Every structure is written in C-alpha cells, then in structure tokens.
Image (tube, rainbow, N blue to C red):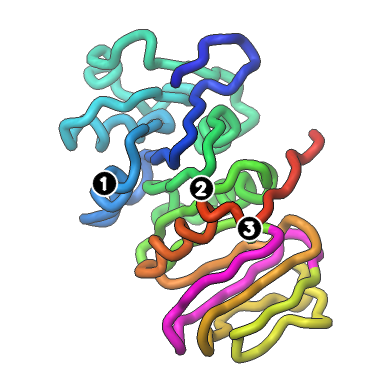
Amino acid sequence: MINLTKNKPIVRSDEPIALIGGGQLGPDDLNLALIRVNTVVAADGGAVPVMDSGRMPDAVIGDFDSLDGAHRDRIPADRLFPIPEQDSTDFDKALRSVVTPLVLGVGFLGGRLDHQLAVLNSLVRLPDRPCILLGEREVVFHAPPRIELNLTPGDVVSLFPFQTVTGRSRGLEWPIDELVLEPTGRVGTSNRALAKVELSVDAPGLLMMVPRDALDEVMRAFLSGQTGQWPARAE
C-alpha cells in the first residue's frame, strides 16, 4: 500500500519487500530478490535495473540525482517520491520510509567503499527497520535482540560492532559470552558455526554476516516473529 500522507511512511506492507539500489548488482541478485517478494521499492537509480528487467517499481524514493530522465518519464507520477534533502543517502531515505516485517536489499554492497559504509551506518541508525543486505558472498543484517539460524557447520559467521555491545552465543566455535565488542576494540569477525547458531545481544549496534546461501534461513528467522525488535532510535 502506498501512503501519500505527509510525514508518514510511504510504503506499508504486511509482507517482506525488496529494496533495490543503483549500485553493483551480481548476475542473479535482482532475480533472487524479485522471486521472494510482491512489492518492489527502488532507491533512486535502483529503478533502472528493475525497469530493465521488465518490472515497474511500486515506489521510487530518493533525491533523484541518479535516475535518468528516460526511465523517470516512464514511471507513473504517483509512484515517484522525491526526498530532496542531502543529509542522508538514498538507501537511508528509502529504508526509513517503509514499514514492513523485512526489507531485502540488493544493489547496496560492492563498488565504492564509502557508499557501503554509509549503508551499514544506516542499518545501525534505523534499528527498527529489519533489513537483510545481499552481498557477493554474504548477507549482512543488523543483529536483532535474539536470533537462531540453522547454518552449515564450518560456515563463517562474522560479528562487527558499530556500538559497544555484549551478548551470548551457542553454536559458535568462539563464544561471545562475557566479551565486550566495540568498534575501537574487540570485534568478532571470522567466527565459525558448529551447528545451529543462537545469538542474543543486549543492545542494538551489532552487524552480523553469514554466507549468502543462508539468505532464506535468515529471512525465516526474521519472519518467525521470535527475534524481537529494537525500538526506533531517538534522533
């Protein structure tokens, strides 16, 4: 559903949605997202690959500085939602403008490092917007209060804190119990799954990375309703 009320979310859905960016896309990235959702939102220039695939985005959100005129002219006016401010990225504008149980984001990882860091910053800044980002080798998401994942033994599980957090784990080769993870101190990259991984954390701010082929398992975990959700961060 598209909401045109000022200062209200632009898109609301009771099902997962895909959010497509204009960055680097792997050969099957777009298809992996489109076959898993009914609603597709484009962040600015992300409308181009969606339209070139033969599908019209349900909404296009951004400052429109990377959406060429030829594609923009083909999009119905009621699906265009310009947000002209320059204090945030198009990913941030789009993510904060949708309300859904889960966002599946593609076209935001790879390419320029500064763009990727800005995207990861938004994942942490918007803890109440569950989002899985599809990368070339992994999926990345903001760890919810608790999560259980049925991973393959030996799978790499990386934890990177953008804020100071503590937590507990089961099923990791190196448990995080009693550890303090922080961006200028200890981080948790290159851990490994032994079996089913159970993780709980005491505060938002921890990014979790697992293999790309675990995408459906991560989606299942978020959509099960058992992860809990962080409250919106006060700005």
Going 46% across and 58% down the picture, which residue do you hit? Answer: 220
Going 79% across and 34% down the picture, which residue do you hit? Answer: 235
Task: Report if residue 210 lies within the magenta region.
Answer: no
Question: Would you name the residue on which mark 3 appears?
Answer: 227
Give the distance between the C-alpha atoms of the residues marked 1 and 3, in whole angstroms. Answer: 24 Å
Question: Would you name the residue on which mark 2 appears?
Answer: 115
The residue range painted magenta reads 145-165
Give the distance between the C-alpha atoms of the residues marked 2 and 1, in whole angstroms. Answer: 26 Å
Which of the 4 quarters of the picture holds residue 174?
Answer: bottom right
Q: Mark 3 or mark 2, which is nearer to you?
A: 3
Quadrant for the N terminus in the image: top left
User: Above or below — where is 19 with respect to 30?
Assistant: above
User: Above or below — where is 138 with respect to 155?
Assistant: above
Residue 58 screen position, x and y as percent: 35, 24
Image marks 3 and 2: residues in contact by CB distance under 8 Å = no
Question: Would you name the residue on which mark 1 appears?
Answer: 35
Going 51% across and 45% down the picture, which residue do you hit? Answer: 102
Residue type at mark 2: give it: His
User: Above or below — where is 170 with respect to 231?
Assistant: below
Going 32% across and 30% down the picture, which residue do you hit? Answer: 47
